[in-house]
Amino acid sequence: MLVISVILIIVITMQPTKTNSATSALTGGAEQLFGKQKARGFEAVLIRVTTVLGIIFFGLALALAYLSAN
């Protein structure tokens, strides 16, 4: 679980930011809503890896909680 946690932190910090500075704060992020494009390439891989690692982490947490209760 510790290894999954460290890898998950690394993958999350590698993802690009979604904000565009002060413009996003003034417009409320409306340009992201209407101009949203599907992630491609390395960004898509990072999203998939983050999702899989999150599911594995959650499953391990539930399994450890079950094992410690019984």
Image (cartoon, rainbow, N blue to C red):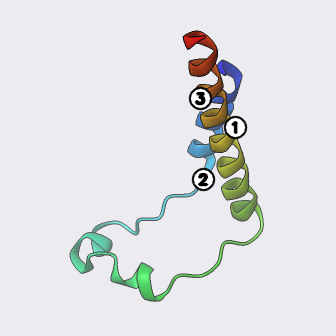
Dot 2: few (<14), some (14–19), or many (≥20) neighbours within 10 Å?
Answer: some
Residue type highlighted by circle 3: Leu
Q: Nearer the viewer, residue 19 or 34?
A: 34
Q: Which residue is mark 2?
A: 15
Residue type highlighted by circle 2: Gln
Mark 3 or 2, which is nearer the eye? 3
Callout 3–callout 1 Cβ contact below 8 Å: no
Q: In what element is the residue under mark 2?
A: loop
Q: Nearer the viewer, residue 51 or 14?
A: 51
Which residue is situated farthest in the left direction here?
Answer: 26
Name which residue lies at 57% across and 43% down. Answer: 13
Residue 1 lies in quadrant = top right
Q: Earlier in the sequence, mark 3 or mark 1?
A: 1
Q: CA distance from mark 3 to mark 2?
A: 27 Å
Residue type highlighted by circle 1: Ile
Name which residue lies at 70% across and 54% down. Answer: 46
Q: In what element is the residue under mark 1?
A: helix
Residue 60 lies in quadrant = top right
Which residue is situated farthest in the bottom direction here?
Answer: 34
Query: Residue 11 shows which numbered tag?
Result: none
Q: Is residue 55 left or right of residue 34?
A: right
Q: Could you say where residue 44 lies in the image, as x and y percent from the top left?
A: 72, 64
Callout 2–callout 1 Cβ contact below 8 Å: no
Query: Residue 56 shows which numbered tag?
Result: 1
Name which residue lies at 66% across and 48% down. Answer: 50
Residue 22 lies in quadrant = bottom left
Q: Could you say where residue 34 lies in the image, as x and y percent from the top left?
A: 44, 89
Residue 14 versus residue 33 in the image, above or below? above
Q: Nearer the viewer, residue 68 or 44?
A: 68
Q: Which residue is mark 3?
A: 62
